[in-house]
């Protein structure tokens, strides 16, 4: 079994690789794991340090838009799990060309190479943001795509390319659409690690608008478990939502982080809302639950406490990243 993981040096991809190489996924117990990652600002070899000595890990530094690199990395691959992307909404508002290049062209380059290499399964990791924003209720996988940011539009485009390679060519593609992930090794630009590390440093946290935007929080370990269920048993051509089951306003989340870090309201700095800020995301996970037996296993309170502790214990990991992006 040979597995190709794109973006395996990023937050979610590295969790998946660490789990795969630590025996968490029985079907991958003997798999050779090839990580293809460009090591952008969000990619970090340190994220793979716990498994760096594994003889089953093969790291390729390269760009998913580079067909020659992708074809070489794809040779002999049975399973592709495609995480690599530009992933931060705010950066896509500041400039979207890299999002279109990596998320759209990069995904097409991978799909084409996977088709030519006749891979057995291609899991495309997408996002619930492709659905847009929902005031009440939850999206089923059949909901139309109405992305609002350049990031989510580029992800929706790659979703549709993935679908087309199944419909047109019969490539066995599954698409997963997950909610907001949190956990260790998340780059400190996303809200939980940004707020946690700011508060640990005695710096204020920027809370967008009225703070009432709602997100569903999914522990990265639950997300990766869901992805593996799809890799093992997902039906080709199908889409599977993956959610965490804990909806919070950003204001509620901020209060929890103030409590967890022993700080208070004086550390909250309201800032002008993000452009086109989606009000609420909520995925219906009935399909993956009934077909594949998925359920989130990490209680949010424990997941958040463990995550805050990880950032407290791992300053050496995040301080240089924050210094570089300041
Ligand atoms: P991340 O930004 O932490 O990591 C992205 C990784 O992709 C990095 O290692 C980076 O170096 C690599 N990469 C970027 N461009 C590349 C290129 N051109 N070629 C090769 N590698 C490249 O992202 P993440 O949070 O781990 O997200 C992983 C996937 O999950 C993404 O597809 C993202 O859209 C999706 N997703 C994330 C979340 C979340 O909450 N983090 C939620 C929904 C969906």
Image (cartoon, rainbow, N blue to C red):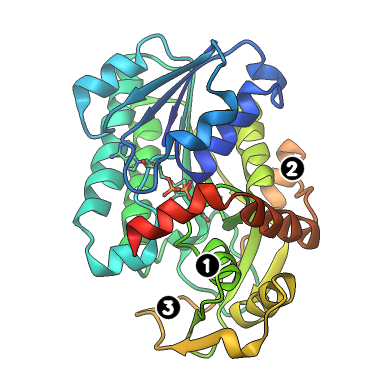
* Closer to viewer: mark 1 or mark 2: 1
Nearer to the camera, 153 or 4? 4
Residue 284 visible in the current orientation: no
In the image, residue 223 lies at what x, y percent? Answer: 63, 45
For the N terminus, the image quarter is top right
Instruction: Pick whichever of labels 1 and 3 is earlier in the sequence.
Output: 1
Instruction: Pick whichever of labels 3 and 2 is earlier in the sequence.
Output: 3
Helix, strand or loop at label 2? It is: loop
Residue wearing tag 1: 191
Helix, strand or loop at label 3? It is: loop
Quadrant of the image occupied by residue 308: bottom right
* Above or below for 97 versus 132: above
Residue wearing tag 3: 277
In the image, residue 201 lies at what x, y percent? Answer: 55, 70
For the C terminus, the image quarter is bottom left
> Circle 1: is it few (<14), some (14-19), or many (20+) Cα within 10 Å?
some
Residue at the image point whose x is 37% and y is 79% from the top? 276
Residue wearing tag 2: 294
Helix, strand or loop at label 1? It is: helix
Residue at the image point whose x is 59% and y is 73% from the top? 199
Residue 100 visible in the current orientation: yes
Residue at the image point whose x is 28% and y is 69% from the top? 93
């Amino acid at each position: 079994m040979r597995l190709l993981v794109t973006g395996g040096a990023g937050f979610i991809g590295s969790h998946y690789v660490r789990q795969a190489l630590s025996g968490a996924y029985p079907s991958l117990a003997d798999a050779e794991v090839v990580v293809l990652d460009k090591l952008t600002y969000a990619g970090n070899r340190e994220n793979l340090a716990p498994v760096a000595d594994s003889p089953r890990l093969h790291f390729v530094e390269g760009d998913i838009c580079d067909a020659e690199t992708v074809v070489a990395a794809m040779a002999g691959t049975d399973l592709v799990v495609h995480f690599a992307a530009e992933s931060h909404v705010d950066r896509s508002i500041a400039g979207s060309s890299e999002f279109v290049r990596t998320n759209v062209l990069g995904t097409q380059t991978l799909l084409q190479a996977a088709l030519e290499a006749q891979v057995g399964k291609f899991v495309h990791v997408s996002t619930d943001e492709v659905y847009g924003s929902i005031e009440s209720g939850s999206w089923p996988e059949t909901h139309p795509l109405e992305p609002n940011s350049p990031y989510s539009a580029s992800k929706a485009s790659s979703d549709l390319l993935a679908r087309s390679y199944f419909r047109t060519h019969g490539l066995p593609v599954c698409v997963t659409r997950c909610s907001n992930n949190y956990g260790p090794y998340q780059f400190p630009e996303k809200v939980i690690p940004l707020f946690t590390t700011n508060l640990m440093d005695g710096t204020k946290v920027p809370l967008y608008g009225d703070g009432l935007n709602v997100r569903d929080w999914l522990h990265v370990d639950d997300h990766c478990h869901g992805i593996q269920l799809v890799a093992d048993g997902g039906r080709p051509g199908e889409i599977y939502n993956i959610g965490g089951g804990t909806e919070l306003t950003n204001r509620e989340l901020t209060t929890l982080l103030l409590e967890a870090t022993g700080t208070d309201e004086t550390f909250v700095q309201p800032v002008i809302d993000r452009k086109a800020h989606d009000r609420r995301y909520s995925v219906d996970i009935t399909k993956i639950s009934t077909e594949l037996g998925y359920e989130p296993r990490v209680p949010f309170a424990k997941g958040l406490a463990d995550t805050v502790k990880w950032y407290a214990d791992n300053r050496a990991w995040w301080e240089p990243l924050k210094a570089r992006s300041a």
